[in-house]
Image: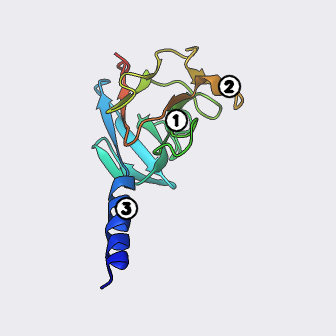
């Protein structure tokens, strides 16, 4: 094997290892009732357990209290995209949505950890300023431009503290 080919293989392996990304979504349900739901592509991938994904992740979460639809209809919804930043202004983003058909049912919050620590949002009532009520209220999105950032989602508790 030539030196150039061997050097190229080693460099490709190092790049692949360095560019891999992993994200964990963790739940903290302090309500004493309900089941946290993490939904990806229309299917529940976690019902309260830590969920770790190798690669980027885009999904929704809510507390199933018996009144919520599969996509969190009639309940407070947390939306997230966890992705390593490749350009300035890129990277992870999360928010709380009360855009109809979503509605306040319990306090919900989120906070990044392992990067952008304690940066997040908390919605403790039906008129909280931290939630989307209309699709164009993008100022409530919370971004994080850190590789491999993780997300804590809390119900009936403030994850940002």
10 Å crowding of disc 1: few (<14), some (14-19), many (20+): some
Image quadrant containing the N terminus: bottom left
Q: Earlier in the sequence, mark 3 or mark 1?
A: 3
10 Å crowding of disc 3: few (<14), some (14-19), many (20+): few
Q: Which mark is residue 16?
A: 3
Residue 99, given in percent of the width and then of the height, sits at 64, 30
Q: CA distance from mark 3 to mark 1?
A: 24 Å
Q: Does residue 158 sit above or below 16 in this rendering? A: above
Colour setting: rainbow
Say how many tags the image has: 3
Is any atom of residue 76 visible in this view? Answer: no
Q: Residue at x 57, y 28 (%)?
A: 141
Q: Does residue 143 sit above or below 40 in this rendering? A: above
Q: Please identify, in this view, whether the residue under mark 3 or under mark 1 is nearer the observer.
A: 3
Residue 23, given in percent of the width and then of the height, sits at 36, 45
Q: Look at mark 2 in the image and give the residue it sits on.
A: 137
Residue 105, given in percent of the width and then of the height, sits at 48, 25
Q: Residue at x 63, y 23 (%)?
A: 139
Secondary structure of the residue carrying tag 2 is loop
Q: Look at mark 1 in the image and give the residue it sits on.
A: 93
Q: Does residue 92 sit above or below 133 in this rendering? A: below
Residue most toward the front? 3
């Amino acid at each position: 094997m030539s030196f150039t080919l061997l050097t190229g293989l080693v460099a490709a392996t190092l790049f692949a290892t360095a560019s891999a990304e992993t994200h964990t979504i963790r739940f903290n349900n302090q309500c004493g009732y309900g089941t946290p739901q993490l939904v990806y592509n229309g299917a529940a991938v976690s019902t309260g357990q830590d969920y770790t994904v190798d690669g980027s992740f885009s999904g929704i979460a809510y507390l199933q209290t018996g009144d919520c639809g599969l996509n969190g209809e009639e309940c407070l919804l947390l939306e997230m995209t966890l992705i390593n930043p490749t350009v300035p202004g890129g990277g992870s983003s999360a928010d709380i949505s009360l855009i109809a058909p979503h509605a306040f049912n319990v306090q919900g919050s989120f906070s990044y950890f392992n990067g952008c620590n304690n940066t997040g949002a908390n919605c403790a009532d039906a008129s909280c300023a931290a939630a989307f009520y209309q699709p164009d209220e993008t100022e409530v999105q919370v971004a994080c431009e850190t590789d491999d950032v993780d997300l804590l989602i809390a119900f009936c508790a403030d994850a940002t503290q």
